[in-house]
Amino acid sequence: MRGLKNFHWLTYIDDLDIPKNWECTSYNNDALPSYQYNDYTIWIDSSDLKTRRENTDHILGCNSPLSERFTVTSSDYKEQLKTNNFRVVVDLVNRREK
């Protein structure tokens, strides 16, 4: 899988068709893998609910509501979208295509 150095994360994206024009921006010390496209950062959590629960607790704190699988932020780090639907993510980041 393109760009992912943390092999644990391969299971986070193995069910997704990541567009070839998305740049992998993941670092090994990140909590989740990420990609950038059109000034958006797309964070991808696990499809496995147990793993996502553990990640949510680690990132947002224990007893936080389960996070959606996909989070999209703009270049100024403002959250633009949280969803479990990958197609919605792709549609959003493609809106800025020239």
Image: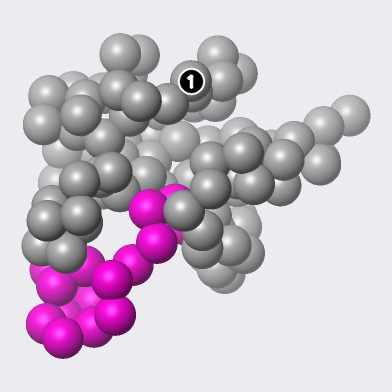
Q: Toward the viewer: 48 or 74? A: 48
Q: Is residue 13 left or right of residue 95?
A: left
Helix, strand or loop status at disc 1: loop
Badge 1 local density, few (<14 within 10 Å), some, or many (20+)?
A: few
Image quadrant containing the C terminus: top right
Q: Toward the viewer: 64 or 98? A: 64
- Here the colouring is one colour
Identify the residue shown where x is 54% and y is 25%: 22
Magenta region includes residue 64: yes
Q: Which residues are magenta?
A: 55-71
Q: Determine whether 20 is above or below 26 in the image.
A: above
Q: Amino acid at mark 1?
A: Asp
The residue carrying mark 1 is: 17
Q: Image quadrant of residue 20?
A: top right
Expressed as whole percent of the image width and height from the top left, the position of residue 66 reads: 28, 71
Does the rendering let one see residue 44? Answer: yes
Expressed as whole percent of the image width and height from the top left, the position of residue 34 reads: 38, 40
Identify the residue shown where x is 12% and y is 68%: 58
Identify the residue shown where x is 64% and y is 46%: 88
Does the rendering let one see residue 6? Answer: no
Image quadrant containing the N terminus: top left
Magenta region includes residue 46: no
